[in-house]
Amino acid sequence: MSTAKTIKTVVSSELVNMGGHIIDQPLPIEGVPNIDPFLLIHHWKGALVGGQREREVGVGPHPHRGFSPVTFVFEGNVVHRDSLGNKAKVEEGGTQWMFAGRGITHSERHDKEFVEKGGPLEFIQFWVNVPAENKMGAPYYKPISKSETPVISTQHDEIYVVAGELDGVAGVAPTFTEQTLLRGKINRGGKRTLTLPTNYNILLYALDGELKVNGETVHGKEMVVFENDGEEVNVEGVFDTRYIVLSGEAIGEKIESYGPYVMNNQTEIMEAMRDYQIGKMGILIEDFD
């Protein structure tokens, strides 16, 4: 017989300044440095003012090594360019999945029409760690559109399965360890039971609205962390609410991180800094229309 998972803690996001933009950061937060294998969650909600050029908006070329930075786009779009030659636009409902591996340089902008006209922009970026044996693998990039993302829906809610499996429905995002990553939307009064493996580390983050999660009230911009017991996460919409669920097996290895690099020891971090400086993570010269 399935049982509900015990809630370990509910924490509110902290406001942080990222390059002049104020964003919500539920992870890491005081007392919760990570939820293995998930290292960081940034929630950006705002708007482009319009009347700008592509090169003036977004994040310019920068490197990564040793993990997967992933972006869920909720409004607007994100245009990815990288040193492997990839260029793709991910729009509302889509996912930008990148594995940095031994090193990649990329930028995250928005398309010409969007930056000229302006409009609402909302996305969540989270970082997923990978085992030491995979950290120096070949990097890759995979854009996933909303239409390519399997969905489980009722008249009261919908769940998009980005990676892993839920109720026999499998996502298409590639992961190195067992994970189930979900994007959910539930209406007021709607109910949904998520059945996830007992051994998974699990977090639920509400973008807005209000939920009852295993009987406990959760407001927008709050994150729920569960104990490794039971199998069920019961979600009830108090108001119309959007949320994400990140769940997966813990890697259980030491983490050493510095800026855009996530490795296992300080020597590897120093090597990453050196390799970027001498061009081993590739060069990105952006092309704009």
Image (tube, rainbow, N blue to C red):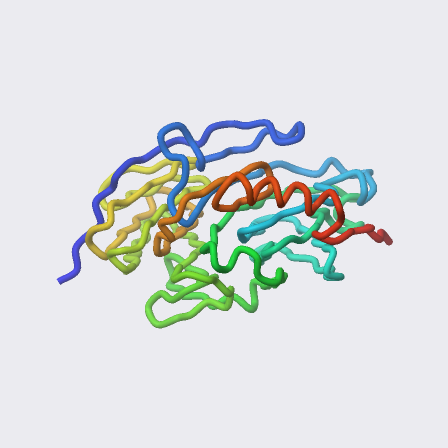
Which residue is at the front of the view, 261 or 163?
261
Quadrant of the snapshot with the C terminus:
bottom right
**For this view, does 173 lie left or right of residue 33?**
right
Residue 110 placement (x, y as % from top left): 73, 48
Answer left or right for 215 relative to 204.
left
Asked where in the image residue 50 lies, by quadrant, the reply is top right
The image position of residue 146, as x and y in percent, is 56, 62
| In the image, farthest residue toward the front | 267
Q: Which residue is rendered at x = 41% and y = 35% of the image?
A: 33
Residue 132 placement (x, y as % from top left): 47, 54
Q: Quadrant of the N terminus?
A: bottom left
Q: Is residue 224 above or below residue 234?
A: above
Residue at x 37% of width, y 63% of height: 154
Q: How many marks?
A: 0
Instruction: Between residue 122 and residue 65, name the one nearer to us.
Output: 65
Comparing 133 with 180, the one in front is 133
Residue at position x 76%, y 61% from top?
85
Going 19% across and 54% down the picture, which residue do you hit?
A: 230
Outermost left residue: 1
The reply, left or right, for residue 1 in relation to residue 122 is left
Question: In the picture, residue 192 is in which quadrant?
Answer: bottom left
Relative depth, front residue between 87 and 49: 87
* Residue 265, horizontal then vertical, whole percent: 49, 42
151 in relation to 236, above or below: below
102 is higher (above) or lower (below) than 126: below
Q: Residue furthest right?
A: 289
Query: Measured along the vertical axis of the image, is residue 141 above or below residue 226?
Result: below
